[in-house]
Image (cartoon, grey):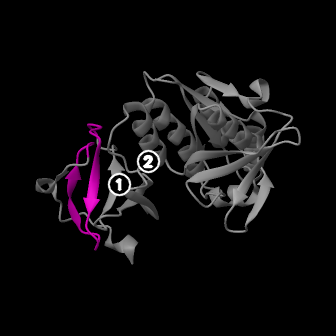
């Protein structure tokens, strides 16, 4: 199995920092998210890639709102988590400096110069390497679960297009890892069978997917104490139907009448 490359994108704009606010738990969630992904990758050939300038901007902006021991502790934890099996793209520069990388925005029908993290991820996709961008921000600046990046240069015979997967939540990232690593025939990321919704389930931030064939709703669940991974399945009205195993087989005997997502559907 080829190495998995996960690009970590930290909050850095004023709006992204304001989203976090002065609640230390929001910053702790960033380190927790990285820790969970690292645990899920145990025994796997992987690499975290980050931009040290992006991290420094995040720290500098965060200290304006929330300076002190608690923030320093979170920053220290983050540094420990990325101290091994990681690369700083400022050191490795894994993209072509004589090329332009533009992110296509379907909402504005415009292309904008990409950040160095996106340049590096697009270049790895172009080289047929396995990678995704894990957003540690509270909002998705790209507005979708992929980033279309056009790579071009005056001396290039033609432009190139890289489609970079985006994981907005821990659940998205874990689902992507499972799909790539285990090469299962069943996956919520199969766009022929499922479509990602804008709904997120609970404090664990698990994305809910819609089954295109019957309108049911699914989310990946691994947050139980025994860490038994499965899918929770709900009908079109948000009522719990049962649990599905990792091959997609639904067990209606595990239906829990107390579980529902109808409040998210309204």
In the depicted structure, whether residue 214 falls above or below residue 159: below
In the depicted structure, whether residue 264 falls above or below residue 114: below
What residue is drawn where x is 67% and y is 64%?
106
> Label 1: which residue?
219
What residue is drawn where x is 75% and y is 41%?
54
Most foreground residue, 256 or 159 = 159
Q: Which quadrant would residue 39 be assigned to in this image?
A: top left
What residue is drawn where x is 30% and y is 37%?
227
Single out the residue that lies furthest toward the right. Answer: 154
Q: Do the residues under discs 2 and 1 have CB atoms within 8 angstroms?
A: yes
| Residue 32 seen anywhere in this rendered image of the structure | yes
> Is 113 contained in the magenta span?
no
Looking at the rendering, the stretch of residues picked out in magenta corresponds to: 225-247
| Residue 60 seen anywhere in this rendered image of the structure | no
Q: Which quadrant would residue 59 be assigned to in this image?
A: top right
How many angstroms separate mark 2 from mark 1 (CA)? 9 Å
Most foreground residue, 123 or 71 = 123
Q: Secondary structure at mark 1?
A: strand
Whether residue 189 sits left or right of residue 6 in the image: it is: left
> Label 2: which residue?
171
What residue is drawn where x is 68% and y is 40%?
122
In the depicted structure, whether residue 238 falls above or below residue 132: below
**x%, y% of residue 200?**
44, 60
Q: Which quadrant would residue 16 be assigned to in this image?
A: bottom right
Whether residue 255 sits left or right of residue 79 in the image: it is: left
Nearer-N-terminus badge (2/1): 2
Single out the residue that lies furthest toward the front. Answer: 157
Single out the residue that lies furthest toward the bottom. Answer: 266
**x%, y% of residue 213?**
30, 64
> Is 244 contained in the magenta span?
yes
Whether residue 227 sits left or right of residue 97 in the image: it is: left
């Amino acid at each position: 199995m080829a190495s998995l490359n996960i690009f970590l994108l930290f909050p850095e704009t004023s709006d992204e920092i304001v989203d976090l606010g002065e609640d230390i738990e929001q910053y702790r969630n960033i380190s927790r998210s990285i820790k969970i992904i690292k645990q899920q990758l145990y025994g796997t050939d992987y690499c975290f890639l980050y931009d040290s300038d992006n991290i420094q901007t995040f720290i500098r902006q965060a200290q304006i709102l929330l300076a002190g021991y608690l923030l320093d502790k979170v920053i220290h934890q983050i540094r420990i988590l990325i101290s091994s099996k990681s690369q700083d793209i400022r050191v490795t520069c894994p993209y072509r400096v004589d090329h332009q990388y533009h992110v296509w925005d379907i909402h504005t029908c415009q292309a904008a110069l990409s950040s160095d993290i996106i340049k590096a991820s697009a270049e790895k996709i172009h080289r047929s390497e396995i990678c995704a961008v894990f957003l540690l921000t509270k909002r998705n600046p790209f507005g979708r679960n992929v980033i279309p990046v056009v790579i071009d240069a005056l001396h290039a015979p033609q432009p190139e297009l890289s489609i970079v997967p985006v994981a907005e939540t821990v659940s998205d990232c874990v689902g992507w890892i499972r799909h790539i690593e285990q090469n299962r025939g069943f996956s919520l990321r199969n766009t022929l069978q499922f479509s990602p919704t804008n709904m997120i389930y609970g404090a664990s931030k698990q994305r809910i997917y819609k089954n295109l064939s019957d309108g049911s709703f699914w989310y990946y669940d691994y947050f139980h104490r025994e860490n038994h991974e499965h899918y929770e399945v709900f009908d079109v009205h948000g009522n719990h139907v049962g649990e599905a195993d990792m091959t997609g087989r639904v067990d209606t005997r595990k239906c829990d009448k107390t579980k529902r997502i109808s409040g998210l559907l309204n």
